[in-house]
Amino acid sequence: MRRTLKEILPPLRAWSGEKTEKLVRSPGGFGLGQVPAHFQPDSTTNIICGFCSTGCGLNVHLKDGQAHNLTPTTEYPVNMGMACPKGWEALTPLQADDRASNPMLRTHRNAEFKTTEWHHAIEFFCERTKQVQQKHGKHSMAFISTGQICVEEMAFLGSLAKFGMGMLHGDGNTRQCMATAVTAYKQSFGFDAPPYTYQDFEESDVIILVGSNLCIAHPIMWQRVLNNQNSPEIIVIDPRKTETAIASTQHYPIKPKSDLVFFYGIAQILIKNGWIDQTYIQSHTREYEAFAKHVEQFTPDIVSQISGITENDLHRLASTIHQGKRVSFWWTMGVNQGYEATRTAQAIINLALMTGSIGRPGTGANSITGQCNAMGSRLFSNTTNLLGGRDFTNPNHRAKVANILDIPVENIPDQNSLAYDQIIQGIEDGSIKGLWMIATNAAHSWINQSRVKKLLGKLDFFCLQDMYHNTHSAHHADLILPAASWGEKSGTFINSERRLGMVKKISQAPGQALSDFKIFQLIAQYWGCAHLFKKWTSPENAFHILKKLSKEQPFDISGIQDYRMIDTAGGIQWPLHEDSDIDPATHSQRRLFEDGKFYHPDQKAVFIFDKPRKNPEPTCNQFPYILLTGRGTSAQWHTQTRTEKSEVLRKLYPKTIYAEINPEDAQRLNIKPLTKISITSRRASIRVDAYITPTVQAGQVFIPMHYEQANLLTHDSVDPHSRQPNYKSCAVKITPEQSENN
């Protein structure tokens, strides 16, 4: 029966749609131009974005004291009025309906979560933690932290757990993105010290990007490249023809994980042709002669066979480096997340050292980190380093920290913590029985995801402290502590270029959620160790403690007076010691090693090298393809825990997981565009949409890391020096769906 028009149409009302008053524009004030009348703020404030390590400044529009809109800060030296899609939507995750707003616990894993009061939740946390330690030993309880909470909170967590609660083992999810860079810098320079400033993007005449899809992963940094007035050579070294590679002047599509051999080969050509800076090498480095001897074996013909790059192209790249007057080398996850990542990063560092491309504008061996406060985690999380980049095994370092914190020196462990992968292994072998996880989602983000999920279920006690109650990790928890997010608390972040920026409370946390800092205060009180942290009364007071811990360290920030100084200066790069005559407001861009002095006792950088390692999971007849993972869109962030809350961002990337495969492979396997295929590793099999594109080479397949299924496939190997996971290479097979049905 045919329906009438009245039955088909929804009810019609004269006022349906936007009312005129919502469309009216009025002067916004505060330099904002015109804004919709209902968005007109009554005040504004600047804040650092809480997504990635770029550390952009955002001008938050406030109405009645609540964040209500934002625009990029025009005068901030990082982004200068620009923002990526995530930055524009930075407020959206705060307003999500599924925020954790009350403590939740359950007495056994199969029970339903029940809301409870804070005093009961903290009592439960302390009781269960002490039970684990009493039954299995103090070292059986561990914590996993994050690069997404404030510096002051990281320092408080690490101090509380290790100095107050007796834990030995704790690591952070920054292990996933920048442990390689940390280790490489420490060994080569004597301290974890990224030397650059973003201004170097605009001053180079040769920019070399290794395993870095800057267009997608760090759009604001890419914009700084585009601001370069020197018509630079933009060189991309990456197996994929990424968005950045498409925009480059030279792309070298090396075979996956041939990086180390490739860079040794470039070094060999530079040395053979005399294209090195002998003066710089002799004055500021050591172990060069041994390095030069080592790379003799990596001749162009051998390197070409291993890397897939022709000998002519190898010489072309070496010649470009030689001809450049200001050459900068940049790397990120494509290097860091590999099984020989530390030595690869150091091979890049060696190229900068041997050509004298460091310490001058537009130069440097520059690692770009991932998370918003990864640099803060590196310095102050108290995980595998003692506070301030010190060493737990050094008695002088322990005594120094104990004196500054006014705590008994015997409270500070004299051993290093297990790394993240070792904590996971500890759960499997039974030495770790309890886990406290803060602001991260290991059940999604860690390698070999199925293994991690099973292991979380083996714990005697698992507490998750996070802003959402429904993450992949939350499903395995006994207790969920609701935490305030970025923008709902105060503190500092440190970005990739060593710039401290302000996080401010611009919105109220939902329900009973508390800042991580406040949660740590409560735990200290209930645990009975609050007297050890009597000076940690607020984030800013904690910051002054951290200033004392930084004195005489390479990252000395004792010259920063207070939070206000950071705010008014537009962020401050470390170091800034207390007797410095530098005005950070006028010298907002500062690089390291301008004087050629590094942080080893002899003030020289060290050439570090090693023989290449075997791939822990090479391809074979059964698994003939190499799986690559990485960022797939500028609209998403890691596991999508926050960015998926934005309707705008969800529209900017495919809803379902997909894999990029080469047309030759697609034709051979009879795969049609957008059909379902299976990608199978030795650990799992997943169904994805097939995207057929020449951006990946034959024999390779690429899957964005944002989708939860991606890490079902990845191989749980790590770089032996940094213990960073090997996300970027594992063996898989591709099966067309129709083949499965036959």
Image (tube, helix red, strand yellow):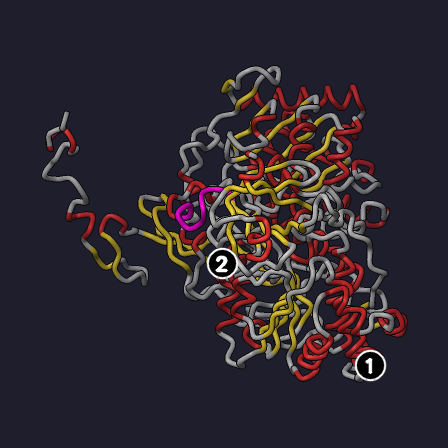
Q: Can residue 166 be seen in the rendering of this structure?
A: yes
- In percent of width and height, residue 370 lies at 60, 53
Name the amino acid, label 2: Cys
Q: Nearer the viewer, residue 545 or 478?
A: 478
User: Does 15 sit above or below residue 365?
Assistant: above
Left or right: 368 as drawn, with respect to 643? right
Q: How many marks?
A: 2
Q: Residue at x 60, y 26 (%)?
A: 476
> What residue would you read off at disc 1?
272
- In percent of width and height, residue 686 lies at 58, 38
Left or right: 601 as drawn, with respect to 695? right
Q: Can residue 578 be seen in the rendering of this structure?
A: no
Neighbor class of circle 2 (other Cα within 10 Å; few <14, some 14-19, many 20+) is many
Distance, label 1 to label 2, CA atoms, is 43 Å
The magenta stretch is 649-657
Left or right: 606 as drawn, with respect to 442? right
* Local SS, label 1: helix
The residue mark sitting in front, 1 or 2, is 1
Q: Residue at x 41, y 59 (%)?
A: 72
Q: Nearer the viewer, residue 583 or 125?
A: 125
User: Does 103 sit above or below residue 257?
Assistant: above
- In percent of width and height, residue 195 lies at 67, 67
> What residue would you read off at disc 2?
56
Q: Main secondary structure of the magenta part?
A: loop
Residue 706 is tagged as none
